[in-house]
Amino acid sequence: MGTTVITARGTGAHRWDPNSLLTGVVHLLGDLVEWVDLDYDASIAVFNPFGRVDGVSEEVSRQHGVANLARAIRETPHRVVLAGYSLGALVVSDFLAAQARGEFADCEVSAVVLIANPARVPGVSYGLPSFGYGLDGTHPRWPAVPTYEIANPVDMITSAPANSPWRQFADQIRAFSLGDVPSWMHHMLDQLDGAERRQALDQWWEPTFWQSYAEAPVWLRGYLSDGQHTVAYSQPHWCDDSGRKVTGIELAASAISHHL
């Protein structure tokens, strides 16, 4: 029996995009696998592959993604490995949570590889010590399937501090405009300042409160302009099972190769 790798790409990426992070993972596996790039919206409102102002919401993207993922699994005769990045990782997470509730019982999955999962739970990290947990909060219970979470410890989407004030802005953070990053960043920092003033009335005496707000702009900069959610995963920050330094992309391919 062969192996089909089903990839769920991140927000705004076109299906079969040759430059996407998960495409790089699959290319390292070559002819060892069949590749299916999940047919779903990859959209958070106006931030979608086609730049449509009427793009569907994240919620709808995730719903469509789960339904289409089940269909893709049923259509392949091979064993299945799932791979998701960012918004795509949320789609895979939703699918696994549904399986844990008893849905999609006919959809067998051999392994799961997630990169920059916004729903990563604390302490779960492959190839690198972890920090914090997913900005969306932790995912619900999953089935007992081998899972590899690849997280950059300074990527706020998957490694946010527990008390990060950005958690209350999570929807806006994931919907920033690539067309005008500086203006959007100033807008978010203005909102952050307002939230700090309001909350300081109740929490002025807590050192952790002031520390979380002092660190917040640095986390945002890492996401918006330093490539911590994107470029960092193509750099050799991780260690594979032999202790060799590898990129996040290489580590993901190595994890999948364990299940071929």
Image: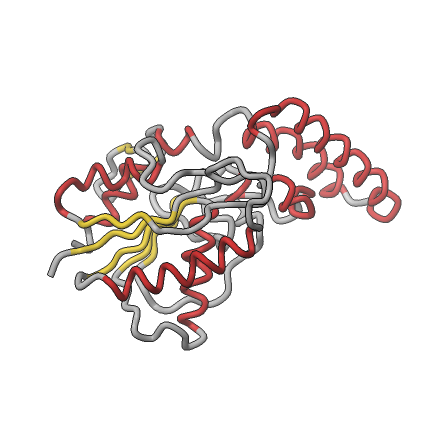
Give the x, y percent position of residue 232: 42, 30
**Closer-to-camera residue (57/95):** 57
Q: How is the image coloured?
A: secondary structure
Q: Position of residue 238 (x, y in %)?
A: 34, 36
Up the image or down, 143 lies above or below 24; here it is below
The N terminus sits in image quarter: bottom left
Residue beneath the point at 25% across and 62% down: 110
Rendered image quadrant of residue 183: top right
Quarter placement of the C terminus: bottom left
Query: Which image quarter: residue 116?
Result: top left
Asked if one can make out residue 256 in the rendered structure from this viewpoint, the answer is yes
**In-image side of 23 versus 118 (left or right):** left
Q: Horizontal placement of 165 versus 94: left or right?
A: right
* Residue 139, position as x, y percentages in the image: 50, 60
Q: Position of residue 148 (x, y in %)?
A: 34, 52
Q: Is residue 115 visible?
A: no
Q: Is residue 70 left or right of residue 208?
A: left
How many numbered discs, if any?
0
Looking at the picture, does residue 78 appear above or below residue 179?
A: below
Residue lying at the far right in this picture: please name it.
Answer: 201
Left-right relation of 145 to 57: left
Q: Quadrant of residue 166?
A: top right
> 239 or 155: which is nearer to us?
155
Q: Residue at x 21, y 61 (%)?
A: 76
Q: For the point 51% across and 48% down, which residue is it?
A: 118
Residue in view at x 13 percent, y 43 percent: 31
